[in-house]
């Protein structure tokens, strides 16, 4: 590659020819000052700064160019003073050449690692699209916003899961779950639940039938997909399955299998929808589910549901405090699912100091105001539509 092409790449660098130009300006400045100050003050050893700084700003080619120019400047200074053959100048030129070569090598290694990391993220992004299949912003009478945060920097997917599907009748079914463990090792278990949910959502007429099918699929296949070699402990999946009819009749319902309870936002009031009889997580035991295990709740036009995994509420601040999701949601303007999700996301990251210790998923679902239920079924026992403190307990 010629000098002209290297210079063109230099100008096209993401730094916009700004910071990247500093090392090359330093070479010229140091060389001029060294000649100006004479033999009494030798500044040429400072030329090593140029390749070292370039390695942090650009790729190996520009780093090599900076090294070559720095060595050339060192040789020019030695020739100018007639000291090219002296031991001191030879040592300086040799040391600068060796350090420049080391800077190029380290930048090359870093660039290879960056490419490998980029490929890993690309694979994770593809896996996320295939596995999670991000829901549409609108499904039936519902508007949806979602967020997924992986605890592993190299990936964008882990053990949390969620999915939407239309039932055979006029209703939308939703599942959100959390695999024990996190990261890429939990993807197999998450895919097991998602596959069973998508297959059964339109096949089973009742919510208990669907949840029983999920539990059966997990019990039969969990051992085959679990990473028991690196994690020999018990494997299970907590999940929450909901059915939201289009017209509000009958009431929306949910079955909770060991998952954190959802939040219902109505008129800036937040109610925690605890299950009256929560079921154990999937994979713990086989069971049949009776119709009375459904927990009904009112979901009117303009209401929002906040579904989440334990990575949200178990997120700790630097002082060790858990994230108080229900209390924070009360204080956020719930003008739309996207707005509410944005406020939660920003506040959550501020609470933990910028990095989560576990995978976390958030869903915000709003029933559009034009779809109001014609009746107001009761909430589960112990719940009231308007809680005096704002957040249900």
Image: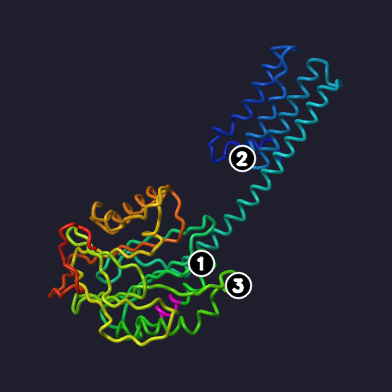
Q: Earlier in the sequence, mark 2 or mark 1?
A: 2
How much space separates mark 2 and mark 1, taking CA atoms? 31 Å
In magenta, the rendered stretch is 193-199
Left or right relative to 109: residue 232: left
* Discs 2/3, front: 3
How much space separates mark 1 and mark 3, taking CA atoms? 22 Å
Q: Earlier in the sequence, mark 1 or mark 3?
A: 1
> Looking at the magenta stretch, what is its main secondary structure?
helix
Residue 197: in magenta span: yes
Would you identify the image quadrant in which residue 170 lies? bottom left
Mark 3 burial class by Cα count in 10 Å: few <14, some 14-19, many 20+: few
Tell me the element at label 2. Answer: loop
Tell me the element at label 1. Answer: helix
Q: Position of residue 211 (x, y in %)?
A: 36, 81
Q: Residue at x 18, y 65 (%)?
A: 369
Q: Position of residue 14 (x, y in %)?
A: 54, 41
How much space separates mark 2 and mark 3, taking CA atoms? 41 Å
Residue 350: in magenta span: no
Left or right relative to 142: residue 80: right
Left or right relative to 114: residue 199: left
Q: Position of residue 212 (x, y in %)?
A: 37, 84
Q: In the image, which disc is placed on residue 282?
A: none
Q: Tell me the residue that label 2 is attached to.
A: 58
Q: Residue at x 56, y 34 (%)?
A: 17
């Amino acid at each position: 590659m010629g000098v002209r092409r290297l210079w063109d790449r230099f100008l096209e660098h993401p730094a916009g020819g700004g910071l990247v130009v500093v090392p090359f300006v330093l070479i010229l400045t140091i060389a001029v000052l060294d000649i100006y100050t004479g033999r009494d003050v030798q500044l040429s050893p400072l030329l090593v700064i140029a390749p070292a700084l370039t390695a942090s700003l650009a790729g190996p080619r520009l780093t090599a160019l900076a090294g070559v120019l720095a060595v050339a400047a060192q040789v020019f200074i030695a020739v100018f003073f007639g000291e090219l053959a002296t031991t001191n100048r030879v040592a300086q030129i040799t040391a600068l050449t060796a350090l420049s070569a080391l800077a190029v090598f380290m930048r090359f290694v870093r660039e290879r690692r960056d490419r490998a990391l980029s490929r890993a993220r690309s694979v994770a992004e593809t896996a996320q699209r295939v596995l999670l299949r991000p829901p549409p912003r609108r499904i039936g009478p519902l508007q949806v916003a979602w967020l997924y945060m992986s605890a592993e920097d190299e990936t964008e997917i882990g053990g949390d899961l969620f999915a939407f599907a239309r039932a055979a009748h006029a209703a939308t079914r939703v599942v959100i779950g959390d695999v024990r463990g996190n990261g890429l090792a939990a993807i197999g278990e998450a895919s097991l639940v998602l596959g069973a949910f998508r297959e059964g959502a339109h096949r089973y007429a009742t919510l208990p039938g669907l949840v029983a099918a999920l539990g059966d699929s997990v019990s039969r296949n969990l051992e085959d997909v679990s990473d028991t070699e690196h994690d020999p402990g018990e494997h299970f999946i907590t999940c929450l399955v909901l059915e939201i009819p289009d017209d509000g009749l009958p009431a929306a319902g949910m079955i909770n299998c060991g998952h954190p309870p959802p939040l219902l936002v109505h008129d800036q009031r937040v109610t925690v929808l605890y299950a009256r009889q929560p079921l154990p997580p999937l994979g713990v035991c086989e069971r049949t589910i009776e119709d009375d295990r459904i927990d009904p709740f009112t979901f009117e036009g303009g209401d929002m549901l906040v579904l989440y995994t334990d990575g949200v509420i178990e997120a700790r601040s630097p002082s060790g405090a858990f994230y108080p999701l229900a209390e924070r949601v009360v204080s956020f303007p719930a003008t739309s699912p996207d707005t509410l999700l944005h406020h939660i996301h920003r506040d959550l990251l501020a609470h933990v100091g910028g990095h989560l210790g576990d995978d976390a998923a958030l869903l915000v679902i709003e029933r559009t105001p034009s779809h109001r239920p014609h009746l107001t079924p009761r909430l589960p026992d112990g719940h009231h539509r308007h809680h005096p403190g704002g957040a249900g307990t």
